[in-house]
Amino acid sequence: MNKTHEVLDVLDWVSGQPTGNTVLRTEAHKRGIPHKAMHLWVYAEWEGRLVLLFQQRSFEKPNFPGLFGPTVGGHVSSGEGQEALVREAQEEIGIQVAPRQMEFLGYNPFHFSLGPGYEDFEWIEDWRCFSQLPPESYRFFDQEVIGMLAIEPQALALVPEGPQKAVFFDGSLCRDRTVEVADFVEGLFTSPLFPTLSHPALFVAPPVGRAEAPS
């Protein structure tokens, strides 16, 4: 998808509801126009442990370069729904996810500024899914993602108190590493969603499988 020409639905910043208008993605960021994004948080079972996966964002990204963020994320084109996450999951980390395999977590506003010319006002729709795939099943077809971090939810909950152990995967090798608050995208630990992420309830949706590289 050509992101320069991507058309987004304009949202009311207070309610998060569509106004009926649309805007180019570039203009939305330039002018600070509220729009919708979606995140998919993937929990996985690695070596008998439940972990939450974070993508490492490319160092070329204008916002949060090199930091760990939602497993899958992206803007939602005008008129799109969960199919946006289906597409992004395949492109970013190489897994095939169907809407029936996702569980809804919440809908919250988020604002980020890079200064004049870049004001991002998003209402983010958060979903989660469960995967039994091993690390080598994940593929980074999209240059926007350069690796993944796996951390146990109980360790994630303690990151605000100090560094915690996790596992980093770059597409070929896993290695232990320590993470702290500064390693993650802004707003994660103060988000209303954080208690849910770090203390997940039981999953009721079926697990996801692997996707082939997109043509």
Image: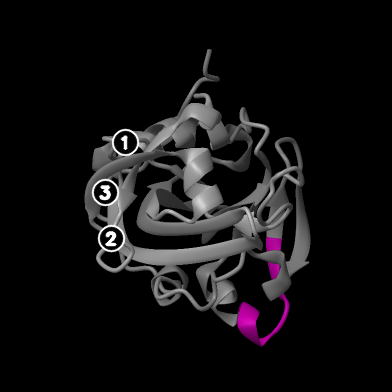
Task: Report whether residue 97 is seen.
Answer: no
**Disc 2 crowd, CA 10 A, few/some/many (<14, 14-19, 20+):** some
Q: Quadrant of residue 134?
A: top right
Magenta span: 159-166
Query: Under tag 1, what secondary structure?
Result: loop
Residue occupying image coordinates x 69% and y 45%: 61
Q: CA distance from mark 2 to mark 3?
A: 27 Å
Q: For marks 2 and 3, give the one nearer the viewer.
A: 2
Q: Which residue is mark 3?
A: 205
Does 3 appear above or below 155? above
Residue, far top: 215
Does 78 appear above or below 180? above
Residue 11 position within the rendered picture, expressed as x and y whole percent measured from the top left: 30, 54
Q: Which residue is mark 1?
A: 78
Residue occupying image coordinates x 44% and y 43%: 75
The foreground one among 202 and 34 is 34
Is 173 one of the magenta-colored residues?
A: no
Of the two numbered discs 2 and 1 on the same chain, state the one appearing first in sequence.
2
Q: Quadrant of residue 185?
A: bottom right
Query: Under tag 2, what secondary structure?
Result: loop
Q: For marks 3 and 1, give the one nearer the viewer.
A: 1
The foreground one among 27 and 167 is 27
Of the two numbered discs 3 and 1 on the same chain, state the one appearing first in sequence.
1
Of the two numbered discs 2 and 3 on the same chain, state the one appearing first in sequence.
2
Asked if marks 3 and 1 touch (Cβ < 8 Å), the reply is no
**Disc 1 crowd, CA 10 A, few/some/many (<14, 14-19, 20+):** some
Task: Report whether residue 177 is seen.
Answer: yes
In the rendered structure, find residue 48 and report the number of the disc placed on it.
Answer: none
The foreground one among 44 and 213 is 213
Q: Is residue 102 left or right of residue 164?
A: left
- The type of residue carrying mark 1 is Ser
